[in-house]
C-alpha cells in the first residue's frame, strides 16, 4: 500500500513488540498467572462495558418497564412497527401451519426436527429465515459444546460452573434442563452423523473452557458450530421440511386473548408481504451483536439485529437479564479486514496466553469471559500496555505459537484450521507469530424469559437459542451456547408439537401492535424510530448521501 | 468513573468506520474495482464485501456470517490482465486494484433426500444418491476453485473408493459455498457428496464413546435427580459456597 | 532369477534381508469395494513372496476406458495424474522402482495404454502438464506393470517353495478376457494364446484346462445395458470350460469376474440346466495353495460360493 513495511503480515512497529513476545515465550510457558480471587474479579469488572457508566437506560414501556438495557436495545424495543397495518390483509393466510419457527440457526432447525419427530406432519411445519437457512451465529461457533459425560464430571458440576459463571442470576430450573439434556444432545448428534474430535480409543477429546472446573468441551476442530449446524440442516432438507428464505418476520399476529397466532413476512427481494397462520410459534431469531453496543465490533453474523426481541416484546413477552452483553475476550484486532472476528476460546484452553506489549502475561487465560475481557480492556486503556494498530485500534497479543510449543508442532494445523486459514489470507502465520486481540461483542446473555421447555408468558409463543433469557444469567460460559440452542430448540419444538395437538388456528390481528403503539405515543417516542432493524447499515456515507428512491 | 466513560468513547471512536460504514474522510489509499463490470473507487483496505457496501450495495444475497464460515459469499473474480477466473469468499478477501468480480447469489445444486439410519455404510451410498461421481475425470478443477484450499478432487476419489474416513478428513473444512460444483465439468456436486460421506462416517465410522453411553444410562436411571433437585432449590448463598468449593479437575 | 541386492528393477523373494524391494502399487476403485477379494488375496500373496507393494498415498480413478480419439486429451488427465503420483513416491524414495504394479486388469490397461500414448507425444504431455499446473510436471519415465508380470519375474522355485496345499485335483480353466492382452503393444502375453496363468497354476499343482474361450469377450460394460446379452456370453464361456473338464475359472479382472460370476443368476433364468461354476480371482487360488488365512480371499464377496468346491477337494478346512 504505502511506505509502511510489512514483515510476515505485520508493520514494523508491531513487529518490534512481537519480537519481545517471541523472546519471552520459553520463560512464560510454565509460568501461567494465577486465577483471580472473587474480589479481584469484582474489581477487574469495573472496566467492563456493561459496568462502565453511560451505556444503558431504563425501558419506559412494556413488560420490563423500569429495567435498564443497553441504549441501542432500548431504542429498538421502543420503536414503531415497520408496517402500516392498514396495508396488510390478515384475513387471507398464505401459509397455514401448525408450527412456525422463526429463525434457522441451530435452535430453529432443531425445533423443526423435533416438531416432526413428535408427530407434526412435515407440511405443517414452516421455517422462516431472514436470509439463508444458515445465516446464523451457530454456524460460526468455533470452540465447542459442553456436555458432562465422563465419570469425573457429573451434571451437577456443569450446573455449578454455569450458574457461578452467570453470577447466580440464571434461572435454576432452566440450567437444570441444560445440563440434564446435554448428554442426550450429544447422543442425538452422534446418530445424525456429526463428526466430533475423538481420541484413538474412541473417547471424546474434551477440553477446558473458561470458568469450567472439568474438561467438558466437545469440538469438531474449530468448526464445531459449522459441523453441528450443517448436519442438522442437511437432515432438515433431507426430510423436506418446508422453509422460506430471505423473508424475515416483521410482525407477529395475536388473537383477542393475546395468544400468538402467526406472523407477517417480508420478501426482501420483491418487497411483497406474506401472512402465516400458525397454531404455535417458536422464536429462534438469535441475538443482537450487530447493534454494535458501546461501539464494539462483533463476532456476530450479518442479521443479528434483535428482531425477535422486538417482535416478542411488542406481543407482551417478558425479558430477563437483557442488561448484560457478552464481550468475547479474544476478537481479532488486526488486520483491519477481520477486526472483531472471533478467535475461539479453545485457543486459550490449549495454552495460548494474552500478552502485553512488553511480552508479559497479565491474566489467567481462562477466567470467565467478562473477567477476561475486562482484564484485556484494562491492560490497553488503563495500564496503557496495549499495542496500537495502523487503523488506530488497541489490543494485546494472544500468543498462539505457545500452543505448538506446548502440544508439539502441527497441533495448530489440526485443531485450528479455520483460524490458521483466515490469518494466512492476510500473510500471517499464527504458528510463528502471535495475533492481536481485543474484546468483541459476542453474545446476548439475556432475552425472552422461558420455562425449561422454552415456553414464554405468551400463549402460543416459545423461544429458543440466543433470543431467550435465563439460561446464562449475566454471563454465558463457552460451549453453553451451542448446547443451549439444541437443548431448548429440541424442547421448544417438542412442546409446540404437543400444544398443536389440541389447539386451533387462532384469529390473526394486530391488536397487540395497536396497544403498543398507544404506549409509544404515551411515552412520547419519536415516530421516526422503527423496528425491527432487519439488517445493519454499512453502506459508505458518500454513497448514502446520494441515494434517492424513485420506485 | 468519568475516566471509564472516556475509555468507552475512545474504543467507540477507534471502530467507527467498522460499525457505521466508512467515511471518505478516513481513507488514505484507494483502488478501483469492477462490480459486475461497473467501476468503483473504494478504500484499499476493505474486503470485497465491505467494498461493495462502501460503493452503496445493501447486501441481501451473497452475505451471511461475514467471517468465512457460512459459505454465502462465493465470489468469482479476475485480476486485471489475467485470463484466469479465480474464486474467493468476499468477506475474507482484500480488494485489489483492477479486480473484476461478481458474487454468486445462489447455487441451485442437487442435494439428496435420504434417511441416514436406512443407508448402508459402503461405497454404494454414493452411487445410489450421486451416481455422477463416477464421471470424475480427475481434472482437479474443483480443487482449484475451492476458497478453503481443500483437496476436493481427492475427497471425491475417496467417495468412489468408499473410504469414508479419508473423505471426512479431506472435506471437513468445507463451508459448502458451492464453487466446486459450479465449476465441475463432470457436473458433480462435490460439497453435497462430501457432506453425505461425512455424516455416514460420523454415524457409522466414528461410534459413540462408551463413557457417553454410561452417562446416558445413569441419567435414565435418575442417578443425579436428587443432587440436581437440591441445587435447583438452593439459595444463592449456598450456591456461592458450593461454587467456591469446587475442585478443578487435574490437568492430567 | 535369484535375488540380487543391487537390483532395483526386479522384485525379489524374501531372503530374510530387510531390504525387500518396494514397488509402488495402484489399487483402483473396484479393489477397494466389490473387488476386495482380489486386493486382499494379492497383497497376502505378495507379502508371502517377499514383494512389498506400497499403495500410492494419493491416487484417483484410472480413467477406466482409454480414449482413442485424438482430440480428447481430457480423458488422459486421470491416468497421467496417477503417473505423477508414481513419480512423486519414487522421487521421495518411498519405493525402489518406477514401475507401478496394478492388479485390476482394467486399471492396468487404462494406465499403461494412456501412459504409452501420452509419453509418446511430447506435445500432448506438455499440454497435460500445463493443465495440471498444481502438480509437478510428469517426466514420462514411470511404467505400468501387472502383478502377473511381477510373479513371472520371480524364481519359480521360490514360488513353489511357498505352496503348502498343492491344488492337486482341482481342474481350473484360466480366463484372460481382453484388457490384459489387447492391444498387443501393451498386452502382457500372446493375445491369441496366452499362457501366463497356466504356467503359474502349474507351479501350484493345479490341473489346468486350456480352452479357446479363454480370450472371448465377457461382454464388458454391456452388462449395464443388457445383462441378458452378457449372460449369453457367460453361458458360452463357462459351458465350454465345463465341457473341457473345468470345475472353476480364474481371472484378474473385476469386471470379467462380475460378468462371469454374478451374471450366472441370469444364465440360470435362461438356462435352468446350467451348473453354476465358481469364478476365482487368480490370487485367491494362490492364497489357497500357499495355505494363507482364507479370510484374505473374501469368498463372501463371490457370487457363486467356491468354498464347497474347495472343501470337496480337501483344499479348505470344514468351517473355514
Image (cartoon, helix red, strand yellow):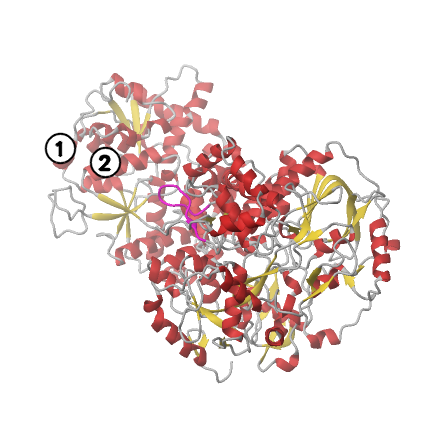
Q: Is residue A145 at least partly visible in the picture?
A: no
Q: Earlier in the sequence, mark 1 or mark 2?
A: 2
Q: Is residue A550 shown above or below C290?
A: below
Q: Is residue A535 shown above or below A236?
A: below
Q: Position of residue C59 (x, y in %)?
A: 37, 49
Residue that numbered label 1 is attached to: C161
Quarter of the image where one finds residue C80 = bottom left
Q: What element carries label 2?
A: helix
- Discs 1 and 2 share one subunit: yes
Q: Main secondary structure of the magenta part?
A: loop
Q: What element carries label 1?
A: helix
Circles 1 and 2: CB atoms closer than 8 Å: no
Q: Where is residue A187 in the image (x, y as percent from the top left)?
A: 50, 38
Few, some or many C-alpha atoms within 10 Å of disc 2 (few <14, some 14-19, many ≥20)? Answer: many
Give residue C45's mark.
2
Q: Position of residue A241 (x, y in %)?
A: 66, 40
* Bounds of the magenta segment: A196-208
Measure how far apart labels 1 and 2 are at the Cα level: 13 Å
Q: Is residue C26 left or right of residue B190?
A: left
Q: Is residue A432 shown above or below A181?
A: below
Q: Does the magenta stretch include residue A204?
A: yes
Quarter of the image where one finds residue B6 = bottom right
Chain letter of mark 1 equals: C
Amino acid at each position: 500500500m504505502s511506505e509502511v513495511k510489512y514483515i510476515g503480515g505485520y508493520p514494523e512497529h508491531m513487529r518490534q513488540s512481537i519480537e519481545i513476545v517471541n523472546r519471552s515465550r520459553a520463560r512464560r510457558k510454565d509460568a501461567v498467572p494465577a486465577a483471580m480471587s472473587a474480589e479481584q474479579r469484582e474489581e477487574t469488572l469495573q472496566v467492563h462495558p456493561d459496568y462502565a457508566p453511560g451505556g444503558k437506560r431504563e425501558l419506559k414501556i412494556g413488560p420490563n418497564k423500569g429495567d435498564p438495557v443497553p441504549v441501542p436495545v432500548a431504542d429498538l424495543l421502543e420503536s414503531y412497527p415497520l408496517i402500516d397495518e392498514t396495508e396488510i390483509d390478515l384475513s387471507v393466510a398464505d401459509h397455514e401451519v401448525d408450527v412456525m419457527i422463526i429463525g434457522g440457526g441451530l435452535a430453529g432447525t432443531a425445533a423443526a426436527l423435533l416438531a416432526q419427530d413428535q408427530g407434526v406432519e412435515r407440511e405443517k411445519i414452516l421455517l422462516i429465515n431472514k436470509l439463508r437457512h444458515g445465516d446464523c451465529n451457530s454456524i460460526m461457533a468455533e470452540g465447542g459444546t459442553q456436555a458432562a459425560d465422563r465419570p469425573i464430571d457429573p451434571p451437577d458440576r456443569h450446573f455449578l460452573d454455569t450458574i457461578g459463571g452467570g453470577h447466580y442470576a440464571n434461572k435454576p430450573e432452566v440450567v437444570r434442563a441444560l445440563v440434564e439434556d446435554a448428554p442426550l444432545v450429544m447422543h442425538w448428534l452422534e446418530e445424525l452423523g456429526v463428526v466430533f474430535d475423538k481420541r484413538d480409543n474412541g473417547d471424546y477429546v474434551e477440553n477446558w473452557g473458561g470458568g469450567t472446573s472439568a474438561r467438558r468441551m466437545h469440538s469438531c476442530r474449530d468448526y464445531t458450530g459449522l459441523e453441528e449446524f450443517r448436519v442438522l440442516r442437511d437432515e432438515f432438507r433431507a426430510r423436506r421440511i418446508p422453509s422460506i428464505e430471505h423473508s424475515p418476520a416483521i410482525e407477529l399476529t395475536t388473537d383477542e386473548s393475546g395468544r400468538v397466532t402467526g406472523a407477517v413476512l417480508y420478501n426482501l427481494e420483491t418487497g411483497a408481504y406474506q401472512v402465516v397462520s400458525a397454531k404455535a410459534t417458536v422464536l429462534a431469531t438469535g441475538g443482537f451483536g450487530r447493534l454494535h453496543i458501546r461501539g464494539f465490533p462483533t463476532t456476530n453474523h450479518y442479521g443479528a439485529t434483535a428482531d425477535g426481541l422486538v417482535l416478542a416484546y411488542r406481543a407482551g413477552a417478558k425479558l430477563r437479564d437483557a442488561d448484560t452483553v457478552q464481550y468475547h475476550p479474544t476478537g481479532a484486532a488486526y488486520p483491519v479486514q477481520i477486526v472483531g472476528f472471533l478467535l475461539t476460546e479453545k485457543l486459550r484452553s490449549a495454552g495460548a496466553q494474552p500478552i502485553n506489549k512488553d511480552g508479559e502475561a497479565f491474566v489467567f487465560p481462562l477466567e470467565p469471559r467478562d473477567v477476561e475481557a475486562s482484564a484485556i480492556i484494562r491492560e490497553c486503556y488503563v495500564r496503557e500496555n496495549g499495542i496500537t494498530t495502523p487503523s488506530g485500534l488497541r489490543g494485546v497479543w494472544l500468543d498462539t505459537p505457545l500452543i505448538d510449543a506446548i502440544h508439539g508442532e502441527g497441533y495448530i494445523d489440526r485443531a485450528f484450521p479455520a483460524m490458521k486459514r483466515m490469518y494466512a489470507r492476510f500473510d500471517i502465520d499464527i504458528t510463528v507469530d502471535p495475533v492481536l486481540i481485543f474484546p468483541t461483542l459476542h453474545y446476548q446473555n439475556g432475552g425472552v424469559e422461558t420455562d425449561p421447555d422454552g415456553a414464554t408468558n405468551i400463549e402460543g409463543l416459545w423461544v429458543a437459542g440466543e433470543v431467550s433469557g435465563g439460561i446464562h444469567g449475566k454471563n454465558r460460559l463457552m460451549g453453553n451456547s451451542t448446547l443451549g440452542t439444541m437443548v431448548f430448540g429440541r424442547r421448544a419444538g417438542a412442546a409446540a408439537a404437543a400444544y398443536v395437538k389440541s389447539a386451533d388456528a387462532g384469529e390473526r390481528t394486530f391488536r397487540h401492535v395497536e396497544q403498543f403503539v398507544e404506549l409509544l405515543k404515551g411515552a412520547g417516542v419519536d415516530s421516526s424510530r422503527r423496528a425491527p432493524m432487519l439488517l445493519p447499515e454499512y453502506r459508505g456515507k458518500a454513497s448514502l448521501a446520494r441515494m434517492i428512491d424513485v420506485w | 468513573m468519568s475516566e471509564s466513560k472516556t475509555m468507552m468513547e475512545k474504543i467507540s471512536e477507534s471502530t467507527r468506520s467498522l460499525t457505521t460504514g466508512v467515511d471518505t474522510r478516513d481513507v488514505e489509499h484507494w483502488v478501483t474495482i469492477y462490480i459486475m463490470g461497473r467501476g468503483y473507487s473504494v478504500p484499499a483496505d476493505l474486503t470485497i464485501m465491505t467494498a461493495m457496501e462502501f460503493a452503496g450495495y445493501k447486501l441481501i444475497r451473497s452475505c451471511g456470517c461475514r467471517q468465512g464460515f457460512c459459505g454465502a459469499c462465493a465470489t468469482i473474480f479476475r485480476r486485471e490482465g489475467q485470463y484466469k477466473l479465480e474464486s474467493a469468499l468476499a468477506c475474507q478477501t482484500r480488494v485489489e486494484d483492477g479486480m473484476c468480480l461478481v458474487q454468486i447469489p445462489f447455487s441451485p445444486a442437487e442435494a439428496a433426500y435420504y434417511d441416514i439410519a436406512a443407508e448402508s455404510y459402503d461405497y454404494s451410498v454414493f452411487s445410489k444418491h450421486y451416481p455422477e461421481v463416477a464421471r470424475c475425470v480427475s481434472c482437479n478443477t474443483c480443487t482449484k476453485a475451492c476458497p478453503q484450499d481443500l483437496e476436493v478432487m481427492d475427497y471425491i476419489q475417496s467417495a468412489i473408493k468408499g473410504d469414508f474416513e479419508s473423505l471426512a478428513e479431506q472435506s471437513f473444512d468445507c463451508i459448502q459455498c458451492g464453487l466446486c460444483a459450479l465449476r465441475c465439468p463432470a457436473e458433480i456436486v462435490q460439497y453435497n457428496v462430501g457432506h453425505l460421506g461425512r455424516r455416514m462416517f460420523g454415524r457409522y465410522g466414528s461410534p459413540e464413546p462408551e463413557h457417553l453411553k454410561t452417562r446416558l444410562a445413569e441419567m435414565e436411571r435418575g442417578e443425579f435427580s436428587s443432587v440436581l433437585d437440591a441445587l435447583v432449590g438452593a439459595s444463592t448463598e449456598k450456591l456461592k459456597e458450593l461454587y467456591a468449593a469446587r475442585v478443578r479437575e487435574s490437568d492430567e | 532369477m535369484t535375488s540380487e541386492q543391487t537390483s532395483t528393477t526386479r522384485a525379489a523373494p524374501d531372503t530374510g534381508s530387510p531390504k525387500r524391494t518396494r514397488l509402488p502399487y495402484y489399487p483402483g476403485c473396484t479393489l477397494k469395494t466389490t473387488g476386495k477379494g482380489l486386493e486382499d488375496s494379492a497383497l497376502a500373496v505378495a507379502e508371502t513372496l517377499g514383494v512389498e507393494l506400497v499403495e500410492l498415498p494419493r491416487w484417483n480413478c484410472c480413467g477406466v476406458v482409454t480414449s482413442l480419439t485424438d482430440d480428447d486429451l481430457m480423458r488422459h488427465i486421470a491416468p497421467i495424474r496417477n503417473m505423477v503420483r508414481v513419480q512423486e513416491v519414487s522421487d521421495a524414495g518411498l519405493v525402489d522402482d518406477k514401475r507401478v504394479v496394478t492388479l485390476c486388469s482394467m486399471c492396468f490397461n487404462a494406465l499403461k495404454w494412456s501412459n504409452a500414448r501420452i509419453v509418446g507425444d511430447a506435445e500432448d504431455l506438455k499440454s497435460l502438464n500445463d493443465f495440471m499446473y498444481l502438480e509437478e510436471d510428469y517426466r514420462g519415465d514411470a511404467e505400468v506393470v501387472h502383478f502377473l508380470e511381477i510373479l513371472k519375474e520371480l524364481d519359480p522355485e521360490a514360488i513353489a517353495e511357498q505352496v503348502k496345499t498343492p491344488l492337486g485335483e482341482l481342474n481350473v480353466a484360466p480366463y484372460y478376457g481382453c484388457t490384459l492382452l489387447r492391444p498387443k503393444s501393451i498386452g502382457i502375453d500372446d493375445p491369441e494364446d496366452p499362457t501366463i496363468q497356466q504356467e503359474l497354476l502349474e507351479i501350484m499343482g493345479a490341473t489346468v484346462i486350456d480352452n479357446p474361450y479363454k480370450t472371448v469377450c465377457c461382454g464388458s460394460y454391456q452388462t449395464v445395458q443388457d445383462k441378458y446379452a452378457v449372460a449369453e456370453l457367460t453361458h458360452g464361456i463357462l459351458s465350454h470350460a465345463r465341457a473341457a473338464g473345468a470345475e472353476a475359472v480364474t481371472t484378474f479382472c473385476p469386471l470379467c469376474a462380475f460378468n462371469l460370476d454374478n451374471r450366472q443368476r441370469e444364465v440360470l433364468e435362461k438356462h435352468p440346466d446350467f451348473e453354476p461354476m465358481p469364478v476365482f480371482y487368480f490370487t485367491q487360488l494362490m492364497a489357497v495353495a500357499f495355505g494363507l488365512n482364507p479370510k484374505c480371499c473374501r469368498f463372501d464377496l463371490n457370487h457363486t460360493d467356491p468354498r464347497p468346491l474347495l472343501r470337496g477337494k480337501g483344499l479348505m478346512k470344514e468351517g473355514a
